Every structure is written in C-alpha cells, then in structure tokens.
Amino acid sequence: MKKYILLILISVVTMNLFSQTKESGFYSFKVKTLEGQDFDFASLKGKKVMIVNTASKCGFTPQYEDLEALHRQYGQKLVIIGFPANNFMNQEPGSAFEIRQFCTNNYDVTFPLMEKISVKGDDMHPLYKWLTEKDKNGVMDSKVKWNFQKYLIDENGKLVDVIYSKEKPGSNKVLAWLEE
C-alpha cells in the first residue's frame, strides 16, 4: 500500500512539474506591442525567433538597419522582436510614440516592436527572466550586458544561444543558425 501511495505521489508531482514547465515555456508569454496591441508568443510556433533589447541613443543603434535587413530576407522563417529598454545609461528615454517614430523615420523598421520593458534588475520583465535563467529556460544562464543583445529561439520555443551586442544580427553565426 505504501508503495502504491508513493507511486501516485510521484506521478502527481511529475505531472505538476511537466505542466508548470509547459505553461511557463516560451510560447506562454503574452506582451503588448509598442502600439498597445496584444501579442501572443503562441503565434510564433514553427518559426525561429530573435529577441533583441533595443535603444535609440546607443552606439549599437545602427543595428536596427541590420535587423531590418535580416527581417526582410528571412521573414518567412524568422521573427525578430525588439524590446525597447532604458536599462543602460538612459539610452531609451522615449515614449512609445517617439520610439516608433524614431525607428520608422531612421531605419524603416517593420519587424515587431513591443512596449518598453526592463531587461535587468528588480523589475526585469518575466520574458527576460525566462531568457536569462537556466532554471526557467532549461538551457543556460546569461546576463543582459548591454543594448542590442540577441536571444535565439528555435522553431520549438527552445532557447538556442545568446548573441552579445558587438556581434551584428547578420553575423556568420546567426546566418548558419538560420540555414540549419
């Protein structure tokens, strides 16, 4: 009898852990676009995704051009999602309207931009907790070191790699991943 109860208890715990992992995976996130519309990550199933924290007044800001070129070339299988963040030296101070205007006027950005969030610290957005904590993403720990850090997610919602700011969005490493 004790063995039977123990087996039931183990089954329940295992099912709960599986359920929690499934529910807290990449596709469970829902965010708002820069314009305030709902964006459900479940809509990204079957596509590769690049998550990028962006800023309008950064030395890496010209990467918007590279991100847009990648979006236009690989848009059928890659979704680039920009998350404006003001975590590094106040380099994204603008409102949603100002950010959209800047990105459109200067870089003709057409890939999705989400509402401004925090990518580090006590107010870190839950998506970035998932991206940076191995116990949540199941792959690796990382820290967001600066603006334009890129996270690569495969077609199954699994974190694949982190590309740091200095490496351009169209680097050989990224292109090899896209061609897999």
Image: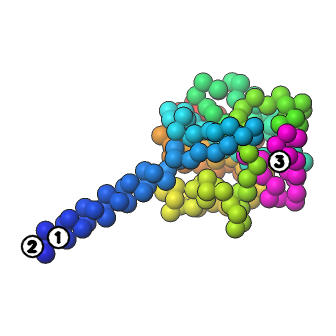
1 vs 3, front mark: 1
Residue at image location 76% in from the left, 49% down from the top? 116
Does residue 119 lie above or below 34 as drawn? below
The image position of residue 7, as x and y in percent, is: 19, 66
Tell me, yes or no, whether the highlighted magenta stretch contains residue 97.
yes
Q: Quadrant of residue 56?
A: top right
Q: Dot 2, crowdedness within 10 Å: few (<14), some or many (≥20)?
A: few
Q: Quickly name the residue at label 3.
A: 55
The image position of residue 113, as x and y in percent, is: 73, 39
* Left or right side of 118 for 48: left
* Magenta range: 82-99
Identify which amino acid the numbered label 2 is placed on.
Met
Q: Quickly name the residue at label 1.
A: 5
Tell me, yes or no, whether the highlighted magenta stretch contains residue 53.
no
Residue at image location 37% in from the left, 55% down from the top? 18
Q: Nearer the viewer, residue 167 or 67?
A: 67
